[in-house]
Image: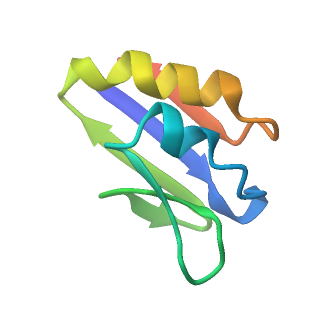
Amino acid sequence: MVVITLQRNKCIGCNYCVELAPKQFQMSKKDGKSVLLHAVDKKGFFTLKSNEEAILDDCENASKACPVKIIDVKSV
């Protein structure tokens, strides 16, 4: 299982996550910040749990590219 967490309120809208993992992230037209698709919000932490191991590499690359380090990716 892959667990991805996004601290959306700290997003600066650089768009790297969307470029590297477009199936998991998109930019909001309302505020220009990243949106983790199909995620659950708990106090500003958006979390997606997926059994799709294929998304791991793209999400790890997005996490590494994020200049404000607000994307956490774990394989459990």
Quarter of the image with the C terminus is: top left
Q: How far across and how far down the image is residue 20, in percent?
A: 49, 31
Residue at screen point 71% across, 58% down:
13
> Most extreme residue toward the bottom, as rendered?
30
Q: Quadrant of residue 44?
A: bottom right
Residue at screen point 78% across, 57% down:
12
Foreground pick, 19 / 70: 19
Residue at screen point 64% across, 60% down:
8
Q: Is residue 65 left or right of 21 when viewed as pictured?
A: right
Q: How far across and how far down the image is residue 30, in percent?
A: 58, 84
Q: Quadrant of residue 4?
A: top left
Residue at screen point 39% across, 33% down:
3
Q: Is residue 14 left or right of 71 when viewed as pictured?
A: right
Foreground pick, 41 / 21: 21
Q: Is residue 15 left or right of 22 when viewed as pictured?
A: right
Foreground pick, 46 / 29: 29
Q: How far across and how far down the image is residue 19, in percent?
A: 51, 38
Quarter of the image with the N terminus is: top left
User: Can residue 23 be seen by looking at this rendering?
Assistant: yes
> Most extreme residue toward the left, as rendered?
51
Query: How many labels sit on residues?
Result: 0
Q: Is residue 69 above or below residue 55?
A: below
Q: Is residue 71 left or right of 13 when viewed as pictured?
A: left
Q: Is residue 70 above or below residue 7?
A: above
Colour mapping used in the image:
rainbow
User: Can residue 75 be seen by looking at this rendering?
Assistant: no
